[in-house]
Image (cartoon, coloured by chain):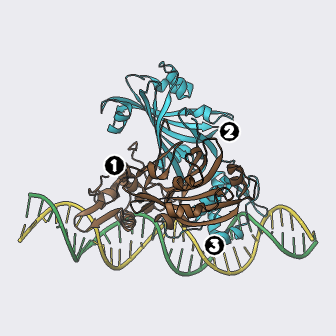
Chain colours: A brown, B cyan, C green, D yellow
Amino acid sequence: MAGLASSIERRNGVSLWRQIADKILQGIASGDFTENAALPPEVALAERYGVNRHTVRSAIAALVQEGVLKAEQGRGTFVLSRKRLSYPIGARTRFSTGLQGQTSERHIALLSSSTEPASRRIAEALGLAKGAAVIRLETRGEADGHAVSRATTWFDAKRFAGIEDAMAETGSITASLKRFGINDYLRHSTVLSARHADADDLAALDLQPGAIVLVTVAVNVTLDGEPIQFAESRFPAERVELRLAAGD
Amino acid sequence: MAGLASSIERRNGVSLWRQIADKILQGIASGDFTENAALPPEVALAERYGVNRHTVRSAIAALVQEGVLKAEQGRGTFVLSRKRLSYPIGARTRFSTGLQGQTSERHIALLSSSTEPASRRIAEALGLAKGAAVIRLETRGEADGHAVSRATTWFDAKRFAGIEDAMAETGSITASLKRFGINDYLRHSTVLSARHADADDLAALDLQPGAIVLVTVAVNVTLDGEPIQFAESRFPAERVELRLAAGD
DNA sequence: TATAGTTGTCTATATCAATAGACAAATTTA
DNA sequence: TAAATTTGTCTATTGATATAGACAACTATA
């Protein structure tokens, strides 16, 4: 975006090949490098970024490993990966409907669940006493077989006893909440940040180390404004962008 | 958040000291490391993250350089920095009012301006013909003397001729638009992503290389829905979080 | 005033990251 | 087929990154 020639920083704790891999990913996402088309040759990229050809090769090797590029000797290096998914966020944010039209299939996989005492933060958000029992769900959002989100979600254990079973069966938060008499809900607040993916996110989202994740911390409420769900979701920045719709 | 012990990745293109510096920043932002309090001693941090003490020292040195920590021989290492700013995003997103209550002073500094032909993307967003003249403003948002955002903004050059002078004088987009008869405007759409800061952002935002920026791409419109402004803003993830208010 | 705890400095070593150059191997084009 | 283009492999060198250990300098406390 803004297509400005943004250059590369040295001695910063992030290796040049990682920075260049990031730039290529950006280039793909922004349409600078077209899908299925050849990347500029290694020597051209090396000149463009002001580094040695071998450094560019390291970046490309990482992206080949990641499944984003495919190199063919004598022919060139080609872009395999599709565009970033655009995940809408608003008052009616829901995983499945949000990606409709961009993917043919999506669901939420339940990785694990547990019951634990609420931390101060979660108790406040859910309007419970600190230490009250809450159910924690660890989930992964999948679309067309690709992991697109990783979330940790908390519910009041008293009110939503057994919601982990509903999640495992339905693969949908919305469907699970229906079983507890909640036919509609709204997103009350969302706080957004970004960080490097940690070990768990790397594994669950099938990312290369060093990847960046967008982090949302959200509270969902009933139509009466009663808080029912607290969630922290992580999205791989290289595969997902978040779209804030106007009247939503 | 979610306070899970997230570990450190090796050979990923991001050096260990940079990853640990990121973790310490996270710890400060999330309240794990309290403001004005001493950090755990270097040996404890080294054990916690499974690295050598010298590696921890490199991370601390970077954060001392950055003004986040202060080390005192014999006593310990102390947290100087305040919490992250929480920047609200919604239909009525405005820089100055958004940070009210969190900072005592804020304004937008105009770094440079130029007139250029609109790219396809910008032309579409502003409803102009491709190649039509647009004014580009490079700005930096400052609060209490700290850089908190870096933005590139485009306006129709015909309709907003001279807006760069208004910006330089008033230090406010809202005030500048008033001079062109626009007393109110709405944010039509926002798309959110994250990436490593580029060279320009590093310099303008006074960041250490390797830092992550949150990126918003937004279109502002008049009350009639007519697009007037296209902007890409970058926020340092370590100093700013974005808050999406419910009914905004 | 010792003593323990903490940060600061130094030396040494091994590995990773980046540059440099040369040439092989495969593909496309003239 | 020959030449040009492009990716793949190899060797060598330099600097940054990370580990290891030892000890100095400073602070707080028993």
Q: Residues within 10 Å of mark 3 (few under 14, many from 20)?
A: some
Residue B187 spot, x, y in % from top left: 49, 33
- Tell me, for residue A100, which label it has, or none: none
- Tell me, for residue B102, which label it has, or none: 2
Q: Tell if the residue under mark 1 belongs to the same chain as the one under mark 2.
A: no
* Secondary structure under the numbered disc 2 in the rendered image: loop
Towards the viewer: A133 or A57? A133
Residue A137 spot, x, y in % from top left: 59, 62
Q: What amino acid is found at the position of numbered circle 3 in the picture?
A: Asn
Towards the viewer: B57 or A242? A242
Residue C13 spot, x, y in % from top left: 56, 81
Question: Residue A68: which quarter of the image?
Answer: bottom left
Residue A13 in view, yes or no: no
Q: What amino acid is found at the position of numbered circle 1 in the picture?
A: Gly
* Secondary structure under the numbered disc 3 in the rendered image: loop
Q: Residues within 10 Å of mark 2 (few under 14, many from 20)?
A: some
- Tell me, for residue A31, which label it has, or none: 1
Please report, as a chain letter, where disc 3 is located: B
Q: Nearer the viewer, mark 3 or mark 2?
A: 2
Q: What amino acid is found at the position of numbered circle 2 in the picture?
A: Gln
Q: Is residue A215 left or right of residue A106?
A: right
Residue B52 in view, yes or no: yes
How much space separates mark 3 and mark 2, taking CA atoms? 38 Å
Q: Tell if the residue under mark 3 belongs to the same chain as the one under mark 2.
A: yes
* Secondary structure under the numbered disc 1 in the rendered image: loop
Whichever of callouts 3 and 2 sits on the residue coming sooner in the sequence is 3
Residue C29 spot, x, y in % from top left: 12, 58
Q: Residue at x 54, y 42 (%)?
A: A91
According to the image, label 3 marks what residue?
B52
